[in-house]
Image (spheres, coloured by chain):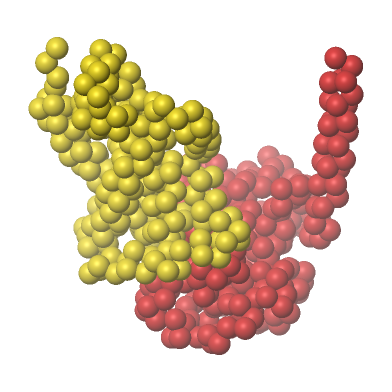
Chain colours: A yellow, B red
Amino acid sequence: MQAVLDNFDLYLKAFGYTVALFIVAGILSMLLGTALAACRVGPVSILRKATAVYVTVTRNTPLVIIFATFSFMAPMLWSHLNFKWVEVSIGEFDFSPFFAAAVVSLTLYTSSFVCEALRSGVNAVPVGQAEAARAIGLPFAGVMRQVVLPQAFRASVPPLASVQIALIKNTSVAAVFGIAEATSRMRSFNNDFGSQRTEIFIAFAIGYIVIVELFSFGASRLERRWRVAR
Amino acid sequence: MRFIRTKAVLVSAALAVTLAACGDAGSDDKGRDVDADKDAAAALPDGSRMKEIADSGKVNIGVKFDQPGLGFKGATDDVPTGFDIEIAKILASKLGLKTSDINWVETVSDNREPFLTSGKVDLVLASYSITDDRRKVVGQTGPYMITGQQLLVKSDSDVDSIDDLKGQEVCSVTGSTSIDGINEHGAKGVGFDSYSECVQKVLDGTVSAMSTDGSILMGYAAENEGDLKVVGDEFTEERIGVGYSKKEPEMCQWINDSLTSAFDDGSWADAFELTLGKSGSETPEPPTLDECPAA
């Protein structure tokens, strides 16, 4: 445990990157996932089919492959996709081209799961709701925004929380794609302090557990507050 | 139906041809076989771990499979190649074992100590730097090679030392000592899964340099001649040694004696020329071995 305590600043910074990846990719994947879900249940047949294909492709591709695509293949196809133009530093943290590639990969991957979780929520909204909304003359966007999606979000809080928890743990893939996040730091601690391997594992497991528990706590509070009375 | 069957035949024929082509693509340097040294084996003290291994007729040696020049095994190779591998063959010969009696076990940086303490491997020669912390868990002796970190950059780059890269990203393998070395010299280490991925990142211009042991970089520079070059002096010092289990302290003196005889009879230098020497580096003087701890 001494190794982690002596380098506690590095430990915290590593989890800082994990959390930063989660927050940025989490928000973007919710936005993109919602748009995808709207397309998937919408009236335009070409959009419905296109999103179905998108979901099938990204959901069935291992995350590592998506990461590899944006780290190695994309820059070869189009040089701007090496994200060299992303170079933001906030305090101690560098949001480098690697960070951008990781966010894009995680967002594209997670958004297909968000889309499907949300679609299950849409299906949980009684058909009468959408029919009534159409009957009072709302267009599709209005039906979605004001009637269906608010109820769908409430119904799908538990699966959405699971998707986002999976995202927290999926950020660890970024360790081998140029980001010094928690898993990468754990490996370097293991390399430097081989005699304290077990303690290092435990310390990093606790870090992940704390983050996931905090998030689940928030999600369960939200679930209780948003419960639809039926 | 017949049409589908014809197609299936065509596809499988095409596949077979492709696979055959892959088989041919295997590397042509298989290293060499080192004959068993029966005299040395007969001199092993009774009741020692060395004697036990020699009598069992098989030795498990942990090596790396992903470091060209040191320990590398291509997808189609049966036996790994590299300097670590050649030294391992010499050590096995001193046990009276042939090269074909060696069971090569792939170890990565994370599992070298666990593999030794659990007895999964008898020896580790996996570009294993000697450090005080590792010596708390396992036995390490040597070094049989001293190396240091250098930089690999594009041929048209004007970087010529790590000081030119302050604040810039430099690629290496996640969790490796090289990443620490980069960070200590003011550059920002970014970690990937393997050195070949870093080479790709240097080639596509995402990072301006990668860094690890000079001997590994030489191999990549030779592979990408004209595109990449190795620059700068060695800015760290790594002492590469042999790992053994702490439960078998008698191994240490035996390893040292075997290495000393390899230094003296020129087989160490041969091993170097056969592997790392190919990329143009001169054969150095054999390093001085550490004393074994009093048992």
Of residues B238 and A58, the one drawn nearer to the viewer in this rendering: A58
Looking at the image, which is closer to me, B277 or A98?
A: A98
Query: If the image is split into quadrants, where does the C terminus of chain A sit?
Result: top left
Residue B142 vertical placement versus A69 (above, below)? below
B36 lies left or right of B187: right
Q: Quadrant of residue A224?
A: top left
Residue B159 visible in this rendered orientation of the protein? yes
Q: Is residue B269 in view from this perspective?
A: no
Q: Residue at x 21, y 30 (%)?
A: A146
Question: Percent from the top left, x then y, of residue A122?
Answer: 31, 22
Task: Identify the residue at horizontal 43%, vertical 44% (top origin).
Answer: A108
Q: What residue appears at the point 24 percent right and 46 percent down from the top-left corner?
A: A207
- In the displayed structure, would residue A169 be above or below residue A225? below
Question: How far across and how far down the image is residue A180, in percent?
Answer: 37, 59
Q: Is residue A13 left or right of residue B94?
A: left
Q: Can you give x and y, in whole percent of width and height, for residue A167 in the image? A: 34, 40
Residue at screen point 72% across, 42% down: B57
Task: Using the rendered view, name the quadrant where residue B33 is placed.
Answer: bottom right
In this figure, what is the number of numbered marks? 0
* Residue B259 x %, y %: 64, 67
Specify whether A56 is left or right of B35.
left
